[in-house]
Amino acid sequence: MATGRNHRPATRSRGIPEATVARLPLYLRALTALSERSVPTVSSEELAAAAGVNSAKLRKDFSYLGSYGTRGVGYDVEYLVYQISRELGLTQDWPVVIVGIGNLGAALANYGGFASRGFRVAALIDADPSMTGKQVAGMGVSHVDDLEEIIQVNGVSIGVITTPGGAAQQVCDRLVAAGVTSILNFAPTVLTVPEGVDVRKVDLSIELQILAFHEQRKAADELAGNGARVPTAARRRAARADEGPEGDIPAVMPA
Amino acid sequence: MATGRNHRPATRSRGIPEATVARLPLYLRALTALSERSVPTVSSEELAAAAGVNSAKLRKDFSYLGSYGTRGVGYDVEYLVYQISRELGLTQDWPVVIVGIGNLGAALANYGGFASRGFRVAALIDADPSMTGKQVAGMGVSHVDDLEEIIQVNGVSIGVITTPGGAAQQVCDRLVAAGVTSILNFAPTVLTVPEGVDVRKVDLSIELQILAFHEQRKAADELAGNGARVPTAARRRAARADEGPEGDIPAVMPA
DNA sequence: CAATCTTTGTGCACGCGTTCACAAAGGCAT
DNA sequence: ATGCCTTTGTGAACGCGTGCACAAAGATTG
Ligand SMILES: NC(=O)c1ccc[n+]([C@@H]2O[C@H](COP(=O)([O-])OP(=O)(O)OC[C@H]3O[C@@H](n4cnc5c(N)ncnc54)[C@H](O)[C@@H]3O)[C@@H](O)[C@H]2O)c1
Ligand SMILES: NC(=O)c1ccc[n+]([C@@H]2O[C@H](COP(=O)([O-])OP(=O)(O)OC[C@H]3O[C@@H](n4cnc5c(N)ncnc54)[C@H](O)[C@@H]3O)[C@@H](O)[C@H]2O)c1
């Protein structure tokens, strides 16, 4: 997903399917909420509803971790929180660095959701000399010249890239050379990394374009006569479009 | 996706597989770069490399759009840019609203990548009265009381939610009631929406947890004796962990 | 015009992920 | 202790997505 799905060639890691791994954080979030309300046990049906998934899927997912449920009762919330946390590696502390402290990088630095799951921002790094030493989210910004040393000293294995697209590959190379083996990339760039390094990408622009595709299809459906299922603010916009995007004949031919 | 994948029950929209739709923006980005360099044609092999995918996959993806290539030559870049843009609905203008102008919402408002693909920020909306009227990214912040009117007047069909998790469902409900039919959700909340409304989610925390899982697995592999494939800054951290996470016997039993 | 070379478009097989449906397991009431 | 009721854990079937491999198509060269 972001989704980002472009990494390891689906090597089942210790038998846990990639799709399951991607859902574990979802379950963990729902379970944490239950735990805070002191709910002792939960059935697969309830938990699945809270996480927004099918209950059979949830049970199968948990079956990869082992048999942690009790038939007729459900799952012990606290125990499951612990098991999933352990499986995801959240029982240990993960120092991360953020490279590129602009709009997005600063927002991420201010984000509380980091620390709440064992991710600690070890450093904020930027190439702009005028940024060096500035305080962002209560932390001084380091210069990119010190990148390697910061990685080494803090034992950082996860890097977040929020530089402009043009600098992303270069920053990525330096991170990897310094020892980072997992990268979360927000820049609109396809990163090339050596084997053994994981990259996940988050691309807002892609998400919007996917939404636009479905939006257009819905608008076309409405025009085609299928009654609207939902009141739509954009209906007038769709009606205004004279040439539907459903045209069978391309409007332009290749040069 | 961020790969959010939790929406429509895989209803093939006009015969184009969901996985293909998710890749079209990737191709479009690569093609746009080629177009700016005035490259006239490109082979599936070259384009696939630029987009970071398998060339057979790319050709199959394009085959869903029609036969736009020329055997022995490749694809006409300009023509393909147009066809994919049309398919994704980017030939029209999509007004969007951002609700929740905090750290992240402000960063998104400042993001140039919006406008470059036909997405226009129609309004910034926040519940905090002290935000109302303030300038963010050269645009005045509107109060959430005016949400419905803004949606109606601008014909907005896409909404971006960057409020705290607790407010997300409520904001979502108002957006949908006002006519929004596509939502991009950054809050760590499972949104419930009526049929016909698309939701995609971007969750930084989930992405990091997935990376942590693989990171832990890599560390465990190294300890198990498989020689390190990549120099790793976190190696000393892994070595420091006395009790490996590979333990067969759970350390804690349910209460 | 014919031979050759390049590259597309796709048939096919395989594997992963999802979902149904149900037997087995365990709690609980009587 | 026995029977009932709830819920798990999983076998099996199915559908989607991926990638190989190749025939067909068209450009290009002589
Ligand atoms: N702002 C958003 O909402 C948003 C959304 C999605 C994606 N993105 C992407 O995220 C990235 C950052 O966006 P932004 O709006 O924060 O941009 P920005 O220009 O505000 O910030 C970029 C920062 O990176 C720093 N930088 C540049 N080159 C560097 C290098 N080689 N090493 C270290 N730091 C370097 C710059 O000094 C700057 O501070 C861009 O690639 C953008 O496309 C942004
Ligand atoms: N900051 C990040 O980098 C980041 C990363 C990932 C996810 N998130 C998520 O994005 C959301 C926003 O994060 P943030 O750091 O920008 O938080 P923030 O507190 O800085 O901003 C939230 C904004 O939403 C506004 N708001 C609250 N209730 C509202 C309502 N009912 N209607 C309209 N506006 C309302 C607040 O006034 C505030 O301005 C959170 O859910 C967070 O978990 C943030």
Image (cartoon, coloured by chain):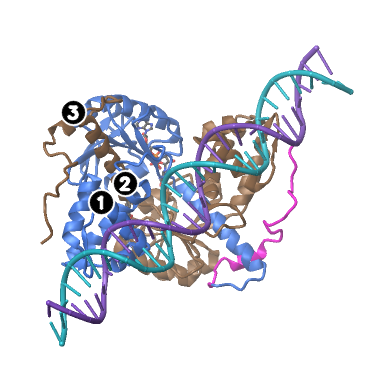
Chain colours: A blue, B brown, C cyan, D purple
> N-terminal of the two: label 1 or label 2?
2
Amino acid carrying mark 1 in the image:
Leu
Q: Is residue A243 above or below residue A138?
A: below
Identify the residue at image location x=55%, y=58%.
A214
Query: Where on the picture, by quarter, is residue A153?
Result: top left
Distance (Cα) linking label 3 and label 2:
32 Å
Q: Is residue B241 above or below residue D7?
A: above
> N-terminal of the two: label 3 or label 2?
2
Q: Which segment did they paint magenta?
A: A230-255
Label placed on residue A65: 1
Host chain of mark 2: A
| SS assignment at label 2 | loop
Distance (Cα) linking label 1 and label 2:
8 Å
Host chain of mark 1: A
| SS assignment at label 1 | helix
* Circles 1, 2 touching at the beta carbon (< 8 Å): yes
The image position of residue A137, as x and y in percent, is 24, 45
Distance (Cα) linking label 1 and label 3:
34 Å
Q: Which residue is mark 2?
A: A16
Identify the residue at image location x=34%, y=64%.
A55
The image position of residue A124, as x and y in percent, is 26, 36
